[in-house]
Amino acid sequence: MFRNSSNLGRPPFPPKHQQQSDFFNKLPLNISPTLLSRQQIADAEFNFQNSAGNLATIPAVTTQPMTYGNGSPVNTSEAPMSFRRRKRPSEESLSRDVKRPRFHSRHSETTVVDQAVPFPEERRCSFPGTIQSPLFRAQYRPGCVPPLRDTVFPDPIETVLPVAKDKLSQQVLELFRACQQQTCDLNRKELCRTQLQREIQQIFPQSRLFLVGSSLNGFGTRSSDGDLCLLVKEEPVNQKTEARHILSLVQKLFSTKLSGYIERPQLIRAKVPIVKFRDKVSCVEFDLNVNNVVGIRNTFLLRTYAYIENRVRPLVLVVKKWASFHDINDASRGTLSSYSLVLMVLHYLQTLPEPILPSLQKHYPERFDPTMQLHLVHQASCTIPPYLSKNGSSLGDLLIGFFKYYATEFDWSHQMISVRDAKAIPRPDGIEWRNKFICIEEPFDGTNTARAVHEKQKFDIIRGEFLQAWHVLRNRKDLNCILPLRAAIQKR
């Protein structure tokens, strides 16, 4: 499963810091970590590392009250030890908004379980453990795949959206603009990831925590949950035994040491087990899995599809909102997952008489190689140019065509959706595909992403919703007829 992965997560040079920072052990016992802002701690650690332990020579400073969590002021002026350094010019204009405190406690008792994945120096980024930090400031051209940046203080990214000349297309764009994930939404998730990674590394010292799914793939909304992948070692992990054991330790960590920050941690024993929890600081619901590396790979494949054609993201968001409104967007209840819905939209756009999307895995096989080392995955798509399609269909026409395709044209009984091949292909005869009502191929590992739809009643409901949406839209051409815009925007 991990061919050519002997150097997974390893930089070509030794990490600068092989050991955990000793900074938190130097804090006075009577200072709670929750009283220090994230920037104060960063400043203090910087000075500690550069002072060779001469803490007595650094003068204390008085800080102003800050806000945290629900916006209530937290007084840090009584903290007897704080440090200041000269600001870099780039920091002068940075926002001093809510900073997430670190969770470290010098009294925590932890057990070292695994040390299999070495990692380089910590960086604030959404794809940890990379050789070249994804914080690079590559020039972004509208229409290209934007590079990952420092999500805490990102550069503005302006994406050129299609022109809407008809009412239905205008409604699609209106919904997209109102509901798409904002930078502040991503920042909240990223801050949680960085802090949780530090805490989990107390148990699994060389593990890495990845933000994956809709939060990074370009198809997230303001209400999207956060998906996290905990990579604990290079080798595959048995999801029924080893992954559950690892997640049970994570759940225990969340419910004890981190109970002040994490609420409702619950271990879900699914095919790919997860820990579900809510972060009180970011107010985001998270799902955390172990070593589901396919999720890391498909995050960046979908991210590329999202940005190489400017009609893709608005169309996907509307379809996800529509499916959620009609209760067919919940794999836990036997309907379609959001991931399956995204693949359905991509497949439809690939199979038009004049395609709007190509097969990226066919056009760029070396950049979406399923054996590529994980620390390189995020870089693969950044140089892929926009896809120039001769198809000038409007968003409204594409939405109507999407519902028509799955209501009347796609052969559910004999065909499988394949984004990898950019076409509908005959169903395999394997056990995973037999007696399944919907077959959607996962682009990397070839599994069925729609395996949750295993009841004919649920399948009939899903197909019925597609048929109804097509009939209504082709006659009325008004999105409110299938998805009340006001309700969808309020929910976000």
Image (cartoon, grey):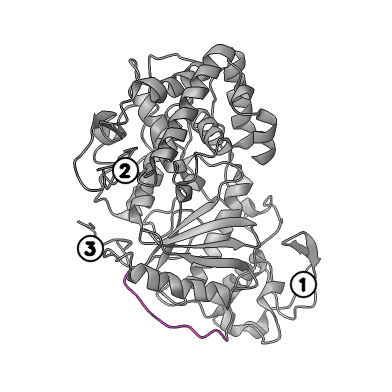
Q: Residue at x 64, y 35 (%)?
A: 488
Looking at the rendered image, the quarter that the N terminus falls into is: bottom left
| CA gap, disc 2 and disc 3 | 25 Å
Q: Position of residue 78 (x, y in %)?
A: 79, 78
Q: Which residue is drawn at 58% across and 25% down?
A: 172
Tell me, yes or no, if residue 65 can be seen here: no
Query: Dot 2: what SS?
Result: loop
| Residue assigned mark 3 | 6
Q: Which of marks 2 and 3 is in front?
A: 2
- Left or right: 427, with 230 as reference point: left
Total numbered circles: 3
- Left or right: 253, with 171 as reference point: left
Given residues 110 and 318, the one toward you in this image is 318
Given residues 329 and 287, the one toward you in this image is 329
- Left or right: 214, with 447 as reference point: right
User: For the magenta stretch, what is the residue range?
Assistant: 107-117
- Above or below, 25 against 5 in this view is below
Of label 1 and label 3, which has the lower sequence position? 3
- Above or below, 24 against 167 in this view is below
Of label 1 and label 2, which has the lower sequence position? 1
Q: Spot the residue most to the front.
A: 457
Q: Which of marks 1 and 2 is in front?
A: 2
Quadrant in the picture for residue 355 = top left
